Image (cartoon, grey):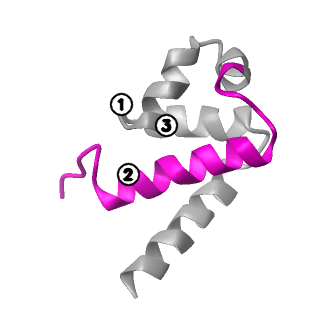
């Protein structure tokens, strides 16, 4: 199953990561600095221009001071709500 950058599931992931960043009171630049990446890295995955690998997802969750498994559970819950 191929998931495009604009698929509903990818959009949910982007929204979740953006919302979690906002809840933490962090800017894209803050997260990028924690990842040792340019701000454009965060802007591109939040804006749907690029996907995150599994390893990058873990790094982003940790940069948000969150447990990656907890973030994944939140995503699965959001996806299952839409499937029902």
Let me know if residue 14 is in the magenta part.
Answer: yes
What kind of secondary structure does the magenta stretch mostly adopt?
helix
Q: Eyeballing the image, is 67 above or below 32?
A: below
Q: Nearer the viewer, residue 54 or 30?
A: 30
Residue position for label 2: 10
Residue at screen point 40% across, 53% down: 11
> Who comes first in sequence, dot 3 or dot 2?
2
Labels 1 & 2 near each other (Cβ < 8 A): no
Residue position for label 1: 50
Let me know if residue 51 is in the magenta part.
Answer: no
For the residues marked 1 and 3, what is the alpha-carbon distance in whole angstroms? Answer: 8 Å
Q: Eyeballing the image, is 22 above or below 10?
A: above
- The stretch of residues the image draws in magenta is 1-29
CA neighbours of label 2 inside 10 A, class few (<14), some (14 to 19), many (20+):
some
- As helix, strand or loop, the secondary structure at mark 1 comes to loop
Q: x and y percent of residue 65 in the render?
A: 79, 40
Label number found at residue 46? 3
């Amino acid at each position: 199953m191929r998931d495009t950058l604009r698929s509903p599931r990818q959009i949910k992931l982007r929204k979740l990561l953006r919302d979690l960043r906002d809840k933490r009171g962090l800017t894209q630049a803050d997260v990028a600095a924690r990842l040792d990446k340019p701000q454009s890295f965060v802007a591109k995955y939040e804006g749907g221009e690029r996907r995150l690998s599994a390893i990058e997802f873990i790094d982003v969750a940790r940069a948000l001071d969150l447990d990656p498994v907890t973030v994944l559970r939140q995503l699965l819950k959001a996806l299952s709500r839409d499937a029902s």
